[in-house]
Image (tube, coloured by chain):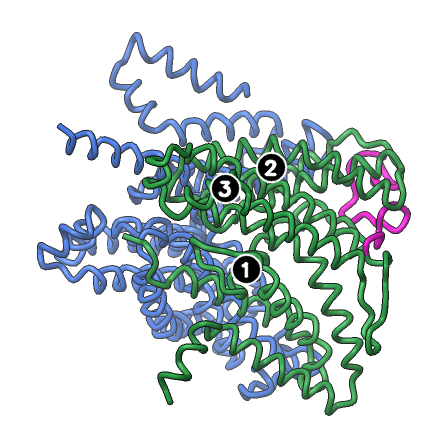
Chain colours: A green, B blue
Amino acid sequence: MRVKLRQPVEQIGVPRLIIAAFLVVLFVVAYVTNMSVSQLVSDSLIRVGMNGVLVLAMVPTISCGVGLNFGLPLGIICGLVGSLISMEMNLRGFAGFFAAIGCAVPLAVLVGYAYARLLESVRGQEMMVGTYAGFSVVALMCIFWLMAPFKNPALIWAIGGKGLRYTLTLSNHFGKVLNNFLVFRVFGVSISGGLLGFFLLLCLLVHLFFRSKLGIAMLAAGTNPLFARSAGIDVRRMKAAGVTISTVLGAIGIIVYAQSYGFLQLYLAPLMMAFPAVASILIGGARLQRATISNVIVGTVLFQTLLTIALPVTSRVIQGDISEVARLIISNGMILYALTRATGGK
Amino acid sequence: MAEVSRARTTVAAGRSVFPGVRRQLAANSVPVLFLALSLTMVVIAGLDVTFLLNEVVTRLARNSLLVLSLLIPVTAGMGLNFGIVIGAMAGQAAIIAVTYWGVPGIGGFLLACLLSTPLAILAGWFAGHVLNMAKGREMITSMILGFFANGIYQLVFLFLVGSVIPIRSPSLLLPSGVGLRNTVDLIATAQSLDMIVWPFVGGVRIPVVTLAVGVLMCLAITFILKTKLGQDMRAVGQDMHIAEIMGIKVNRTRIIAMILSTVIAAWGQLVFLQNIGTLNTYNSHEQVGMFSIAALLVGGATTQRATIWHAIVGIILFHTLFVVSPLAGQKLLGVPQVGEYFRVFVAYGIIGVALALHAWRGRAAQRAAQAALAD
């Protein structure tokens, strides 16, 4: 009996079972205390679409053998710059959204390539160097935001006429364009077809990419570099491609995030954004060497749902906002769990 | 950029005349660069020297233990211990308790040190075990461990205090009666260590006892590294496999290194807080790891070698930069925030560069070993 139970448990993974069980408990509490469960589900789905692309950005780096991309803020910065250019031009709606992506992607390709070169030269310490590369660039960009030559009065400080504001509202630009696109209701749950559709479309593209010749070569380079080299694959190029794609996804991810949130957050806001994304994909069952699209979707759904419903539900029982603390403990606990599992190491 | 070229010209000038000086400069390029940078900024900001000296002496006294706490794990080959924030949290937990009991003066400070020690030992023991499970990834693991511990810390002091832990003090708690206030005034223990002997020498106020504690800790660390345990740590730091074959209990030695580091960090945070006088309950510890590590690296330490002199020189240079950069930013560009962000950038950037150098050297050594094997 025990053996029979163990196999499926191992297949799904203990952390996922615990979080899923916790979610069920939260939903039961919500139902019992007469909360609107459909509202909670709707909010959770929005959060999933909002954060999903950032989590998806982890897949290429893990697959090409670089590991978790703690340097995600580099991509995020590119996305922010793209958004700012689109806003400076006063573009609205979908035009603004796609202009932001259009400006951000070429920038992200350049930055991603440079970042890949850096990571290549520090092989073995990619995660730590990536973390601090991200931190340094975020701090450096703070100086850029202060000095940047933007002229649109909606973007810069009202007094002094110089320097971008900390938070920019997107309501006159491309705020909520995906969120409000193709919204429909199922059993009282409102679903944003635009937001979730965009996320799933990118998932599908990444999935198809890993079925292509380049993608399979990248997977081979990630799982067994020596074998890949003997098969004539340029491992370095594969890693560079993986890191670049991840940076591009990070740039698109923050634009999706910002349009859904309704605000563009500059300065130190991107500093810690890599960590929830890393935690999400690990919660989804990814390992340091292997990640799939299903890890992304499962991880994002579990983690974001938990974060979304933890606050309203627990506030009925406990005073104060425990969701922030729960986020810290769960996300970092999950990263620790992945780092300490006997994989590789010396 | 001017500083870079200036450092280069000094190096170039030394080349022809003093070969020994040149080698010294090359070996200490990081501190020399930062010295040049700091001096340039001091000149730009037009800072009063007495004010600057006051600031630097105070900061040297209050940060010394925190930076020194990093030395032992580096020696044991575990890299920069980002987990000293856990020690800082242990120190804060102790000082919160002492403040609640209202034990005043130096007695309260010593009681806090005593209380924080078992907490820090326990935390260090746990951290050591976790890092033993992540060999080769110690730094990122210790950093995440710090974030994780921060979550636990917030859970305890934001939700359990007042509800489960029976503290009933309106001055400490939030109005709701659960959770600590964001700032706790450490009236009872503020400056208790500095105040013992705190004379003005030529306009500069020198906290003699606090500095003496730092010197004592330097001596203690030197002593520890000379004992059998210290030699074991060095051996483990050089090569874990060889140390294991030599009969050294590698895992145990690494755990002891983490415990020592965490305990020193806890005391270091207490020294820091008594000087500041107020506790930002949920922020005071967060930056401790980053700033201490950046200071040590500015002093010329690497992830594999760090000495007491690196620590002392590093604190002086890093904090000079810390004091003057907002003022220099104000003077130079008319925007003080530029200087503030610049120092954040320096802190992150120096750590990033040090880590990259560490990885480069590691790979060069690996390649050399492979070439030797091929011969």
Q: Chain of mark 3?
A: B
Q: Residue at x 53, y 66 (%)?
A: A283
Any mark on residue A114, and which? none
The secondary structure that dominates the magenta segment is loop
Residue B215 visible (yes or no): no
Q: Secondary structure at mark 1?
A: helix
Q: Position of residue B305 (x, y in %)?
A: 29, 42
Q: Position of residue A53 (x, y in %)?
A: 66, 53
Q: Nearer the viewer, residue A127 or B160?
A: A127
| Residue at the spot of label 3 | B319
Left or right of residue A132: residue A161:
right
A23 is higher (above) or lower (below) than B105: below
Of pointers 3 and 2, the one earlier in the residue sequence: 3
- A264 or B216: nearer the viewer: A264
Residue in the picture at 57% in, 81% down = A21
Q: Residues within 10 Å of mark 3 (few under 14, many from 20)?
A: many
Marks 1 and 3 in Cβ contact (< 8 Å): no
Element carrying mark 3: helix
At label 1, the amino acid type is Ile
Check disc 2 and report the residue beneath it. Answer: B342
Under mark 3, the amino acid is: His
Question: In the rendered structure, which segment of residues is drawn in magenta?
Answer: A154-178
Q: CA distance from mark 3 to mark 2?
A: 13 Å
Q: Amino acid at mark 2?
A: Phe
Give the label, 1 or 3, closer to the camera: 1
Drawn side of residue B109 relative to residue B154, left or right = left
Q: Secondary structure at mark 2?
A: helix
